[in-house]
Amino acid sequence: MDSQLSFSFELFPPRTPEGVTKLPAVIRRLAELHPDYFSITYGAGGSNQEGTYETLMTVIKQTGVEAVPHLTCVGSTRAHIACLLDRYREAGVKRVVALRGDLPATAMSPSAPGDFHYANELVSFIRETYGNAFKIDVAAYPEMHPQAPSPGVDFENFCRKVEAGADAALTQLFFNADAYFDFMERCDKAGIKIPVIPGIMPITTFDRTVRFCEGCGADLPRWVRLRLEELQDDKPALLDFGLGVVTRLCETLLRNGAPGLHFYTINQSEVVQRLWNNLALTTSCEQGH
């Protein structure tokens, strides 16, 4: 397997004392797989910004693996974003994931208070203020952002982020490989050349998988949903089935030219390690470092 492929893991700042206690061990186990980087999310309205920083520093201090913070802009000011970026740069961060973020619950339209309304504005601000100090990743939606009025409008929004200076894109989770291939065909026709890395969600429970898909507008194939529902009280069988589904998805993506994989770990290491081993990624990644 091509050692130039990019493999990365997403973490979220723990929300409970138990999660805080467990996370360092999860990070250590995942770091043993030699990912290119860990990305760290934060919640709506920047509620977990401090948690993002603490999780980022845990990754850096414990593993030495590159840590990439998510940065959401809706409702924020330029001064606030610059303050965050300065802090991250001091910590050695060289890459960020630039996102719009969730609109405040009280917002009736994208015109929320603040200096930014869309992710392309955040990308432009980072480029204008920091030049090439940061590599900028943005989000891509092979099946359309759930709040977009149409696939065409959604793709135009993606193009604006690329034109603003994005270096790469990470997709929303999906279980239909054709959605990704169709998106890449549209990128090719539009002259977009940046890497678009598939976002991969391991299947661990029926309820969580359905909830994530409904929340982001991703299609869960009916046959997969029915089997997960049938197996929801047999966790080992459900994990085995889900692992097979996601392994085949990853194999199809890589075999057909995907530039890597970005795993949404949900702060769990075991199922990601099993998926990693199924795909025989460890050797190729070690050769790339």
Image (cartoon, rainbow, N blue to C red):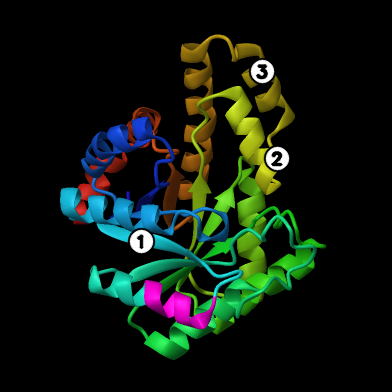
The three-letter code of the residue at mark 1 reads: Val
Question: Is 63 situated left or right of 43 in this image?
Answer: left
Name the element at disc 2: helix
| Residue 167 appears anywhere in the view | yes
User: Mark 1 and mark 3 in contact (Cβ < 8 Å)?
Assistant: no
Q: At 53% across and 84% down in the image, what residue appears?
A: 124
According to the picture, the residue beneath numbered tag 2 turns out to be 214
In the image, residue 156 above or below residue 277:
below
Name the element at disc 1: strand
The three-letter code of the residue at mark 2 reads: Glu
Q: CA distance from mark 3 to mark 2?
A: 15 Å
Q: At 52% across and 74% down in the image, what residue appears?
A: 193
According to the picture, the residue beneath numbered tag 1 turns out to be 68
Task: Check residue 259 for magenta coloring.
Answer: no
Mostly what secondary structure, the magenta segment?
A: helix
The three-letter code of the residue at mark 3 reads: Glu
* First in residue order: circle 2 vs circle 1: 1
